[in-house]
Image (cartoon, helix red, strand yellow):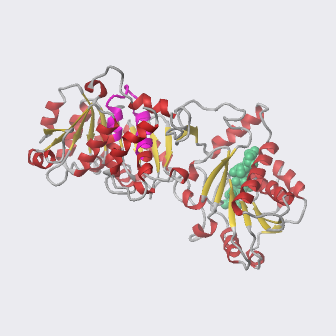
Amino acid sequence: MSSVEIHQMRDCPTSAQMGAIETSAMKDGVTTGAEMMRRAGRALARAALEASGAGPGDRALVLCGPGNNGGDGYVAASALREAGLDVQVSALGDPRNLRGDAALFVEEWGEAIAPLDPEALGQGPRPALMIDAVFGTGLSRPVPDVLPKAFAAIRSAPGAGPLTIVAADIPSGIQSDTGALLAPGGAEEVLAADLTIAFHAAKPGHFLEQGPALCGTLEIASIGLSQDDRTPPLTEPHEGDITRLVAPGAAEAAKWLAGWARPEPGGHKFSRGHVLVLGGGPGKGGAARMAARAALRTGAGLVTLGVPADAITENAARLDAIMLSVVETADDLGGMLEDDRLSALVLGPGLGIGERTRAMVRVSLDARRATILDADALTSFADHPEELFDRLHEDAILTPHEGEFARLFPDLGLKSRDMSKIDAARRAADRAGCVILLKGAATIVASPGGAASLHPGLYERDTRWLATAGAGDTLCGILAGLAAHAPDGRLHGAAECATSIHAEAARSFGPGLIAEDIPDRIPDLYRAHGL
Ligand SMILES: NC(=O)C1=CN([C@@H]2O[C@H](COP(=O)(O)OP(=O)(O)OC[C@H]3O[C@@H](n4cnc5c(N)ncnc54)[C@H](OP(=O)(O)O)[C@@H]3O)[C@@H](O)[C@H]2O)[C@@H](O)CC1
Ligand SMILES: [K+]
């Protein structure tokens, strides 16, 4: 079995869920608030020393806020002092107003605490490291102007050597549930950290919207309540409203992948499923061909491309193992679907926008196969999304990018939503009555009823090379290849697995990736996972 692992599920808690996890751990006597804060602050100090290379005699600045995030900062300040650094603390708000555990650590710090004054901070000398412990999961409104001003002043203060900024839990200004930056315009650059130490678990805001741009490197520190030390997970897989973080790294990875992709012993090609990809007219076939190739590579036993008669010659010249059929109209498609061995359908890549596509989508959905709707199949319903929603069912899945998503769900699109991308996908899944795979650097899979998972194509799983024409078409194909033999009602899991395969295939290619490369990386990936 490979040491490279493809799939892991962990909770990605909202700020309310994080509060509940902490409260329940304290109630059960697993830990105390002070113990968690001590661990958090010490982890911060350790990481900051390592990242900055600072040592005894170097200057450190700790910015502390008015809540428990500030409490972490006071612990870190004491720990840095213990390590021999010359530490200065600057606070937003009056530290005498701090209550509970944070107040305890203010007392333990016991030295001067300066107010957060940009002018004074700008006089330097610039520190070697700075800890941002102003706001964490409790940020509830835009940060006061003084905060970005103080960051800007510190950055440009006179001093030798570089400044390393380490954020406690999440960079101050990033809303931890949504990733939105709640700060005046232009604050993005000054508030960015070099390293973020998230406590207990990564939060949605580390992956969404402006979050990734401000976090720098992301590391997770245990504070004594995690699954791997003392408490069991508080949630069941796919419980409503819990977001699961699906990322490479877990030991069950190969087993999980094998469950979806490995052929049954003694099986035949039909037992591995038959995928039908519908394509458009002449000169428009590339997207559907890439989806078809990805489906075959992923593990469908047979793949057929259905195209209008005038596109047959072009496609025949390009295809061998993939079969070709004339599908001119929705009636032709209905005829093909009388063969109930056709187990998964892909409609969208290169299909064309308009009535032909709408009619094909209707026939496909009425046939109740695993049906993947993407690209043109979604955009064809932009004017009347209800017509699509009325027909969708639990064996269908929509795979929009943000633009297509906004066309179908205008009130939930990036520009108009007042909730996280995760909640927007959940809301959309409820409205549509099927699984939604909302693509992006962080891809969300959401099911009706609240189950949601987030696949982070960020940080150590960076998938930036996937932002290339046709990559989405190959994701549809991979999903079809899995869905073709997925047990009923398992499309959420198939979508998670497809997203992981797609991302890992792309990552294994790396720089210069084009969409055609993706399907052909899958065999190596499978082999590496012991399939
Ligand atoms: N036991 C635990 O819970 C542990 C928690 N831990 C740490 O605590 C963090 C969560 O702590 P938290 O809940 O106290 O929230 P935090 O982010 O410090 O901010 C809240 C304060 O800021 C204020 N405020 C908010 N927005 C504002 C604005 N725009 N402008 C001005 N003020 C604003 C807000 O005021 P209010 O909204 O109540 O008026 C309140 O005073 C978490 O991220 C982790 O680092 C760890 O130590 C492990 C143990
Ligand atoms: K912070």
Rendered image quadrant of residue 175: bottom right
Residue at 20%, 50% (x, y): give it: 285
- The vertical placement of 163 against 339, above or below, is below
Q: Is residue 397 magenta?
A: no
Which range of residues does the magenta coloring cover? 478-502
In the drawing, does residue 424 fall left or right of residue 45?
left
State whether the magenta stretch is mostly helix, strand or loop: helix
Rendered image quadrant of residue 3: top right
Residue at 34%, 37% (x, y): give it: 298
Does any portion of residue 256 appear in the rendered image?
A: yes
- The vertical placement of 23 against 213, above or below, is above
Q: Position of residue 299 (x, y in %)?
A: 33, 34
Count up the numbered dots: 0
Residue at 72%, 58% (x, y): give it: 50
Q: Position of residue 343 (x, y in %)?
A: 27, 29
Between 317 and 437, the one lying in front of the other is 317
In the drawing, does residue 101 fall left or right of residue 352?
right
- The vertical placement of 460 against 231, above or below, is below
Q: Is residue 492 magenta?
A: yes
Rendered image quadrant of residue 316: top left
Q: Position of residue 395 (x, y in %)?
A: 34, 31
Q: Position of residue 487 (x, y in %)?
A: 38, 25
Residue at 51%, 37% (x, y): give it: 2
Does any portion of residue 431 appear in the rendered image?
A: no
